[in-house]
Image (cartoon, grey):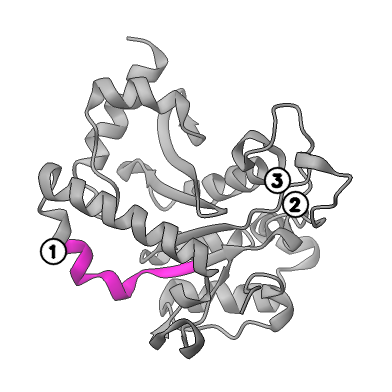
Amino acid sequence: MNEDERIAVWLDSLLKVEMDLRFSRGVAKEARLGPKVPRVLILEEGEMAGYAELRRVGGIIELATVVVEPELRGKGLAHQIVQQAWERWRQDPVLHGAPLGGQVDLVKATRDDAGPEIVLSPMISFTRDAAMAAALVGGGFTMIPRKRRVSRLWLWKSDFAALPIWTQICITMDRLYRGVIFLFKSPKRIPHFIRHSRDYRLFVRIPETAERPPPRMHIRSEREGGVPSDLMDQMDAVAFTMKDLETSSEQITAWDEGE
C-alpha cells in the first residue's frame, strides 16, 4: 500500500462518521484524486493525524474538510493545520491560479505591468465547531459578524452576506451541487446540514494580513511577552460562546468591495 492509499483509507474512515464534512468518494477515488487537490497533511509519529483541503471557489480560497484523528484531538493539531494552510496560501502561486513559478503577492493590487504574477485571493473557512473556530482565530482569521445587507437582498442577519456577490453565487452553486450528490450518496447528511445551517460561522483571512504570522505562533512565548489581550478575548469568545465579535473596519478593508 503506497502513501496515497494509506491517506485515503484513513480519510475514508473519518469522512464516513464526520457528518459536518463532505462524503467519502471511496478509498480508490480518494487515493486517485487526493494528490490532485491542494491539501494539508499532519503526521504524528509517521501516522496520519490531521487533514485539510484548500479549494478555489468564486475568487477565494476555502479551507475545508478539516479533520483530526479522534484520539489526538485537544492537542493543538487544528492550529498546526491552520498555520500550514496560511503558509501555503501566501506562497503557492498554483493555489491562486497563477502560472507555475510565478511570484505570489497577496498584498499588492494587480497592476498592468505585473501580469498574472500578482495574486489577490482571500482565504475563508466555515465551521460550527468551537475548537476549530479558536484555531482559526489563533491563525489570524476574523469571525465575520452577522449583518443585514438590504442592497444584496439579505433581509436577515447573515455573515454570508459579507461575501462578494460573485463568491456568494459560486459557493451557493457549489453547495447545491454537493447537496444533489448527498441526495444519492449520503442522504442522511442533508437533514443534518439543514438542522445546523445557522450554526456555521464565517471566518476570513484577508490578503492585507498575509504576511502577518498567525497570532497562535506567539502563544508559546507567553512568558517572554504575553499574548495580546485582544487575541485572547477573541479566542475566549469563539471557544466558549461563538458570539459575534466586534471587528474594526480596518480588519476587513477591501473584503467587501463592490457594494
Q: Is residue 195 magenta?
A: yes
**Tag 3: Cα neighbours inside 10 Å, few (<14), some, or many (≥20)?**
many
**Tag 1: Cα neighbours inside 10 Å, few (<14), some, or many (≥20)?**
few
From the viewer's perspective, tell me whether residue 163 is left or right of residue 248: left
Residue beneath disc 2: 106
Q: Amino acid at mark 2?
A: Leu
From the viewer's perspective, tell me whether residue 154 is left or right of residue 257: left
From the viewer's perspective, tell me whether residue 119 is left or right of residue 79: right
Mark before the other along the chain sequence, 3 or 2? 3
The quarter in which the N terminus is drawn is top left
Q: Please determine whether, in this image, residue 210 is positioned above or below residue 97.
A: below
Of all residues shown, which one is farthest toward the right?
113
The reply to whether dot 3 and dot 2 touch (C-beta < 8 Å) is yes
Q: Please determine whether, in this image, residue 25 is positioned above or below residue 114.
A: above
Which range of residues does the magenta coloring cover? Answer: 191-202
Q: CA distance from mark 3 to mark 1?
A: 36 Å
Residue beneath disc 3: 90
Q: Is residue 179 magenta?
A: no
**Tag 2: Cα neighbours inside 10 Å, few (<14), some, or many (≥20)?**
many
Estimate the x, y position of residue 254 in percent, counting from the top left. Answer: 70, 71
Q: Residue at x 48, y 59 (%)?
A: 125
User: Residue 101 appears in which quarter of the rendering?
Assistant: top right
Q: CA distance from mark 3 to mark 2?
A: 7 Å
Q: Which mark is residue 191?
A: 1
The number of discs equals 3
Q: Amino acid at mark 1?
A: Pro
Q: Which mark is residue 232?
A: none
Q: Amino acid at mark 3?
A: Arg
Which is the main secondary structure of the residues drawn in magenta? helix
